[in-house]
């Protein structure tokens, strides 16, 4: 039921993959990218965050940044640092972190599957972020970053992927950020390609795990080209990496607040939570969270009668927002309110302590991670999760695959 097709990837030369590949554009800021790319002409940040090659005073959304990205992509291709394959292939991308592996199929998915609801979302997007990626796609005439998709476990697909991995050597194999091992296989056998394509045709839906802004941007550019009658077959599809849901790990997405603590704070907490001092800094089950304030950790357990049954309302991030953050501190819009920020689960709870102890923040909440089944349930119900509900690890690196839209 979903259209998952092979494509001619633009990808690094084998001896340069570890030098090209970088963290996603949206998990580092311009200064971090500039620092990480220092002394490395092969760094994909020169394309994905091209402002690093321009004056620091320039906005990362300036027209010149997108022009520089396109120029750098052209230079990478001319120098052979990136090359485009001559035939349509699939690719396998395995990430291993702390002994745990997940393997995705690198392919192109259909903009029509997205508009018809076969590719399901669970987050809202922000217009300004869409515009940024749309400008990047238009300038480079390519999907420059992959969409992280998931699907419900399928035995036929998993068998084909595993058999290929076991019988073929990886073309890339290197270790990068956070000691994650990255391995990539070229899957170029036409018979296996057709078997995989047929197997995905029986999959009812795909789910966006991460990359809602990239998806919206890729789809809108494709529809724009279609309307202008300037589309190629390629612009009807966008770059994706598809993982079975049972292999994915969602880590917690913690909250920090800079707020004034009311005198009756603990009394108000007890309306919806049981509260006690804690020694553990991470919750061990859903329906509870740890709070760090004034040098102490507390365990907050949500009272059963306060937990709704709907798929969004029962999420821990929703419970914290609806029972504590909004009613006690009047933080209604977590996207724009400067009194709240978020810390991904790649950081240990000691980071929360550090932030609060610095007195730049008042209180921190260590969360229990959202589960993949929660994400699928919300998406199937056509509901939307609160912002910053999921933090996926390990991160897919950018620069290993680009998808040429072939419209210029």
Image (cartoon, rainbow, N blue to C red):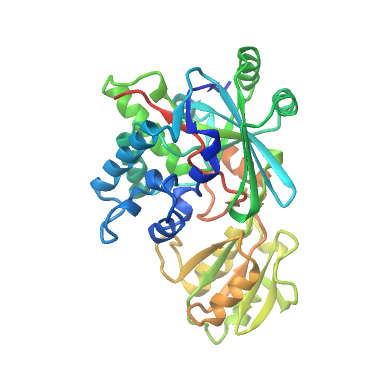
Q: Which residue in the rendered view is the most extreme toward the left?
A: 63
Q: Quadrant of residue 303?
A: bottom right
Q: Is residue 152 left or right of residue 222?
A: right
**Residue 155 shows up from this direction:** no
Q: Which residue in the rendered view is the most extreme toward the top?
A: 191
From the viewer's side, name the closer residue of 123 and 140: 140
From the top left corner, tell me how far across and down residue 85 is, in percent. 48, 23
From the viewer's side, name the closer residue of 111 and 10: 10
**Residue 176 shows up from this direction:** yes
From the top left corner, tell me how far across and down residue 121 is, in percent. 52, 40
From the top left corner, tell me how far across and down residue 267 is, in percent. 62, 81
Q: Is residue 255 left or right of residue 154?
A: left
From the top left corner, tell me how far across and down residue 274 is, in percent. 71, 73
Q: Quadrant of residue 195?
A: top right
From the viewer's side, name the closer residue of 176 and 63: 176
- From this view, report whether residue 323 is shown above or below residue 247: below
- From this view, report whether residue 328 is shown above or below residue 104: below
Quadrant containing the C terminus is top left
Taking the spot 47% from the left edge, 18% from the top edge, the residue there is: 86
Taking the spot 46% from the left edge, 39% from the top edge, the residue there is: 145
Taking the spot 26% from the left edge, 61% from the top edge, the residue there is: 57
- From this view, report whether residue 170 is shown above or below residue 188: below
Quadrant containing the N terminus is top right
Total marks drawn?
Answer: 0
Q: Is residue 257 left or right of residue 218?
A: right
């Amino acid at each position: 039921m979903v259209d998952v097709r092979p494509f001619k990837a633009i990808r690094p030369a084998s001896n340069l993959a570890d030098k090209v590949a970088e963290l996603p554009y949206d998990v580092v800021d311009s200064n971090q990218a500039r620092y990480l790319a220092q002394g490395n002409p092969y760094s994909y940040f020169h394309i994905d965050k091209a402002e690093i090659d321009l004056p620091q005073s320039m906005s990362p959304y300036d027209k010149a940044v997108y022009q520089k990205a396109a120029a750098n992509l052209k230079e990478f291709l001319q120098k052979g640092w990136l090359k485009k394959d001559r035939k349509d292939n699939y690719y396998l991308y395995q990430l291993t972190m702390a002994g745990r592996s997940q393997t995705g199929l690198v392919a192109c998915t259909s903009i029509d599957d997205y508009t018809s609801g076969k590719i399901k979302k669970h987050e809202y997007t922000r217009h300004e972020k869409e515009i940024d990626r749309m400008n990047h796609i238009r300038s480079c005439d390519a999907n420059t970053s992959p969409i992280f998709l998931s699907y419900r476990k399928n035995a036929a697909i998993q068998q084909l992927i595993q058999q290929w991995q076991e019988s073929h050597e990886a073309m890339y194999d290197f270790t990068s950020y956070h000691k994650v091992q990255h391995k990539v296989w070229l899957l170029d056998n036409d018979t296996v390609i057709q078997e995989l394509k047929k197997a995905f045709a029986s999959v009812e839906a795909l789910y966006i795990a991460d990359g809602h802004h990239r998806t919206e941007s890729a789809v809108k550019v494709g529809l724009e080209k279609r309307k202008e009658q300037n589309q190629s077959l390629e612009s009807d599809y966008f770059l994706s990496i598809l993982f079975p849901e049972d292999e994915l790990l969602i880590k917690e997405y913690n909250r920090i607040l800079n707020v004034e603590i009311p005198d009756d704070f603990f009394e108000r907490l007890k309306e919806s939570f049981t509260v006690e001092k804690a020694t553990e800094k991470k919750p061990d089950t859903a329906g509870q969270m740890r709070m760090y304030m004034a040098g102490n950790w507390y365990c907050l357990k949500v009272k059963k009668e306060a937990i709704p049954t709907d798929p969004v309302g029962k999420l821990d991030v929703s419970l914290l927002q609806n029972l504590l953050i909004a009613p006690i501190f009047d933080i209604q819009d977590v996207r724009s309110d400067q009194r709240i920020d978020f810390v991904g689960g790649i950081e240990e709870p000691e980071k929360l302590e550090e932030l609060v102890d610095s007195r730049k923040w008042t209180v921190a909440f260590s969360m229990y991670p959202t589960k993949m089944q929660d994400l699928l349930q919300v998406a199937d119900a056509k509901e939307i999760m609160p912002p910053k509900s999921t933090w996926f690890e390990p991160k897919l690196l950018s620069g290993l695959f680009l998808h040429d839209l072939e419209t210029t």
